[in-house]
Image (cartoon, rainbow, N blue to C red):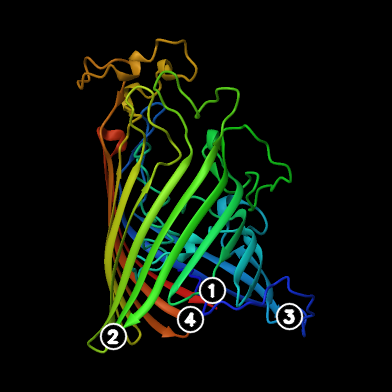
Amino acid sequence: MKKLLLGSTALVAGGLMAAPAMANDPIRMGVGGYWTGYAIGGAIDPVYSMNNGAVTNFRGLNFIHEGEIHFIGQTKLANGTTIGLVVEIEANHAGGAVGLHTDETFAFASGDWGRIEFGSRDPGSYRMYWGTPSALIGFGFFQHNHNWAVSAGANKAFRSGIATTIAPQIQESNRINYFTPRFQGLQLGIGYAPKVASAATSVVGVGVCGNAGSGNNPVFCISRDNSYTDMIDIGANYLNKFGDVNVALFGAFMYASLDTSNVIAAGAYNINTGFKLDAWKQWVVGAQFGFALGGGTLTVGGAVGWDNNGIGGNMYTGVGDDTMFYSAGLMYATGPWQMSVGWAGFRNTNGNGNTQITSAANAALANQAAAGTFAAAFNNTGTLASQAAGALSFGQHTLDYIEVGLTYALGPGIRLTSGGVYYAASGPNSMAESDAWGIMLGLDLRF
């Protein structure tokens, strides 16, 4: 889990721009990173195609892994300001891409005045998260690098894996982040990104202007293209200790404007179904408490949040595709052992409805059809025999996730990890339903 903790406890008048200050030594690069791999066995329900009702089945045994190599360099100026650079390279063959795949690249500066980051970087408030703990490395509730489930093709409750922090869908965008010094346990963070996603094509990240990655990173950003722009995220956390109890509190908010196009584009506005995009908004709060117990530490925590997924209220139903999410768990650590159990629940309003297998390919739902043809989308009597061609199903989409984790430290940076996961997705019809479970054994390396 990536976390940013600034140890400063007081604001100091000295500033980054106060006066030229030469470094005593040039920037020197070091190498770090991690690698996590699992053998996992279990079952994943088949998925039905929205185009023709075809079925996709999944194997019950698989080997998965994910990792990164980090090049980190820094130096300190005479005025005490630290200047540095981080370049992260994916340590796995991602998406069949040939050659190296860059994850994040950013410059940073820090001092008594706080810390600034500039470049391809995750939102600052995202990394300030404190909430549900987990010992199952690569899964958990903060940065879900692995999954053993699919979204059932139409279940809207799946939210960037099982993340219950702020803005997990928006990673590695070109941005600037600022963190205040920590004062009396409190730290604030704020970030800004000019452009984070092309909404009309549901693309977030690689290859989109304003984002780094293995795709291109255009210098010029197109405007009025139904994209999310001018993203601002604000976060705060509070860390303190009262007697034998460690306390960590977290809260964050994100807002990104919708840069609408003059032309109605597929995926952005639909006359027939009433679907429309809107400004992207999220908020999350979380808490974590640690207690000494039996020679070890018991940690309990949880989080709750809301995400409108960048979608506005339906023009006909008045309801959007908002997701409320919750998580809670506990972890116990003693000596080389860590063990945890946790749950997360996601509830999506599904105000735009979802397609049924019997009508998934029906042309009546095509974008920009003639006015008045939207009736087909809502004429669903609930029975297969009388269901109108192209009718949508309405009703809440849900996802519940349960995990257990157990790890053992073999040595510095070397940990055996094991656990189990269970996913249960449901909705108003079979297109939104899918269950999965898995048991795994793996290895985590940090260097």
The residue labelled by disc 1 is 181
- Could you tell me how far apart the alpha carbons at marks 3 and 4 are, in whole angstroms? 31 Å
Amino acid residing under circle 3 = Leu
Secondary structure of residue under mark 3: loop
Q: Which mark is nearer the camera, 2 or 1? A: 1
Q: Is residue 132 visible?
A: no
- Pointer 1 or 3: first along the chain: 3
Amino acid residing under circle 1 = Pro
The residue labelled by disc 2 is 244
- Could you tell me how far apart the alpha carbons at marks 1 and 4 are, in whole angstroms? 29 Å
Amino acid residing under circle 2 = Asp
**Position in image of residue 134 (x %, y %):** 34, 68
**66 vs 73: above or below:** above
The residue labelled by disc 3 is 77
- Could you tell me how far apart the alpha carbons at marks 2 and 4 are, in whole angstroms? 27 Å
- Pointer 3 or 4: first along the chain: 3
Q: Which mark is residue 413?
A: 4
* Neighbour tally class for label 1: few under 14, some 14-19, many 20 plus, Cα within 10 Å: many
- Could you tell me how far apart the alpha carbons at marks 2 and 1 are, in whole angstroms? 25 Å
The residue lying toward the viewer, choosing from 155 and 54, is: 155
Q: Is residue 167 visible?
A: yes
- Image quarter (top left, top right, bottom left or bottom right) of the C terminus: bottom right
Instruction: Verify CB contact (< 8 Å) between mark 2 and mark 1.
Output: no
